[in-house]
Amino acid sequence: FILGGAIAHQLSVGFVPVRKKGKLPYKTIGERYSLEYGVDEIEIHIDAVAKGEKVLLVDDLIATGGTASAAVRLIERAGGEVVLCSFVVDLPELGGADRLRAMGKQVVALAAFDGH
């Protein structure tokens, strides 16, 4: 939240938190995604994204891309258009950024760290 909120403030645009299921106080829509050890779900408020609204997805880390790709699907299902996925750190060997690119998304990261 610190990154997304700060960036939204600097751009003078709205901020939409994407949270694990049950963490938001209002009516929500959710998207399930697979983990190594099971399934999880993220949510946004049902009225958070207007149809056709452009969205910058911001997170601290992209690893396998499970959460980020679920966030893209969720935002698009709500009517938004994810125009850029941005991260502080990319772990390229885990393939998350490539997973988002395969969805047609532009991906940027401030730093990338290989696993070796």
Image (cartoon, rainbow, N blue to C red):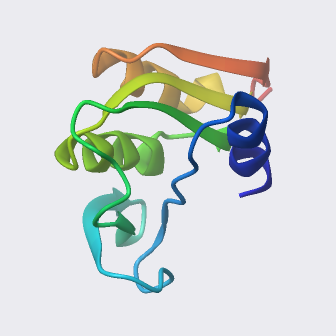
Instruction: Name the residue rendered at 39%, 48% in the picture.
Output: 71
Question: Going 70% across and 29% down the picture, which residue do you hit?
Answer: 11
Question: In this picture, is 75 found above or below 39?
Answer: above
Is 13 situated above or below 82? below
Tell which of 30 and 10 is nearer to you.
Answer: 10
Is residue 111 shown above or below 71? above
Q: Nearer the viewer, residue 98 or 37?
A: 98
Where's residue 56, x and y in %? 52, 30
* Nearest to the observer: residue 81 or residue 37: 81
Determine the residue positioned at 79% across, 20% down.
Answer: 110
Q: Position of residue 93 (x, y in %)?
A: 60, 25
Q: Quadrant where the N terminus lies? A: bottom right
Q: Is residue 2 above or below residue 64?
A: below
Q: Quadrant of residue 60?
A: top right
Label tally? 0
Taking 97 as reference, is 11 left or right? Answer: right
Q: Can see residue 90?
A: no
Q: Could you tell me if residue 94 is visible in this image?
A: yes
| Residue found 79% across the figure and 25% down from its top | 113
Lateral position of residue 53 relative to residue 94, left or right = left
